[in-house]
Image: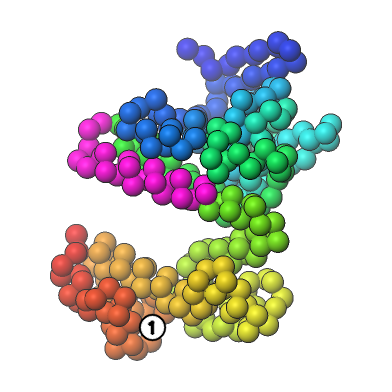
Amino acid sequence: MAKNEQKEKLNEILRIGDQCQEKFLPISSSKLEFIKSHGICFAGTSILKGDYEIRRKTNNAHLIHYTLSGTGWLEINGKQRTLSPGDIWISPDGTQQHYGLKGPKWQVVWFDLKDQGPWAILKNIGTCVRKSVMGARFKQLLEMLIWEFQDNRLHSENVIQHGSELLLAYLEREFKVEYDSKNFDVVNKLHKLFYEKVKSRLRYSWTVDSLADESEMFISADYFSKLCLKHMSMSPMKIVTRLRMESARDLLHSTYYSINKISELVGYTNYFAFSTAFKKRYGLSPRAFRYKYSI
């Protein structure tokens, strides 16, 4: 059945060309009852190419739309704006929508949320676009959940339940930020700093001063530390240590690198300091952890 459809009724348009690729979370499955009961009525990932344009009077749900790569366009009050990587577009239930592909490719993740529970507040904010670091995480979660439905895999129901709970927690976290408009920019910058910049450069000798400089918030190291404690419940260096330990744990579990090499990769020049920090977090030395949990 061809995807290409056009609907011209009550000024509505639905054009989805044959080059577009979409994956949908099978919400109708009984395994996703937890998600449905919490108001998530539709979700998926899309790689849009060629012909793509949507215009409708309402989506009959709150639409949450993340741009991962490429660009799209959105019409708001007769004016067109570009949706770029890192953008989240929020379109409350009852809001007219007109959007489409801009450029050769547009990769997105989206959710339809019922007007209930924590999502009811979205009706009060109107259509808006802002930055978010959550899009890539939602893509990974949705693809993992969709993959679990391919066949009856071992422990698939447990994985689906845990994945569903994580999906809901991330959505609620996203809109807790939305409710507090004074803080969302700070939170996003902190997440980008630690989960993108620091995580990709764990070997760097991070200090509170260098983290504050890298945050692009143009604030003192002392004030940066206070923001970390307020919004992430940890001091800056404790966050860095946690990221280093999590990376070391993954490397011990899934690679054959020497423990000395792993300690260097995650930013330790002293093996004993690394071993002490690892044991403090996981209750085992790196060597004992590898022996117990390695592949």
Q: Tell me the residue at 26%/61% (across/down).
A: 254
The amino acid on which the numbered mark 1 sits, given as a three-letter code, is: Tyr
Q: Tell which of 209 and 56 is nearer to you.
A: 56
Please give the range of residues in magenta: 151-172
Which of the 4 quarters of the picture holds residue 37? top left
- In percent of width and height, residue 40 lies at 49, 35
Residue extending farthest to the front is 117
The quadrant of the picture occupied by the C terminus is bottom left
**Above or below, 74 relative to 264:** above
Residue 161 magenta-highlighted: yes
Q: Which residue is mark 1?
A: 268
Whether 30 is drawn above or below 119: the answer is: above
| Total labels drawn | 1
Left or right: residue 274 compared with residue 181: left
Expressed as whole percent of the image width and height from the top left, the position of residue 208 reads 56, 83
Tell me: 72 left or right of 169. right
Query: Which of the 4 image quarters holds residue 7?
Result: top right
Depth check, front residue: 60 or 218: 60
187 over 12 or under it: above or below = below
- Residue 95 picture location, percent across and down: 71, 30
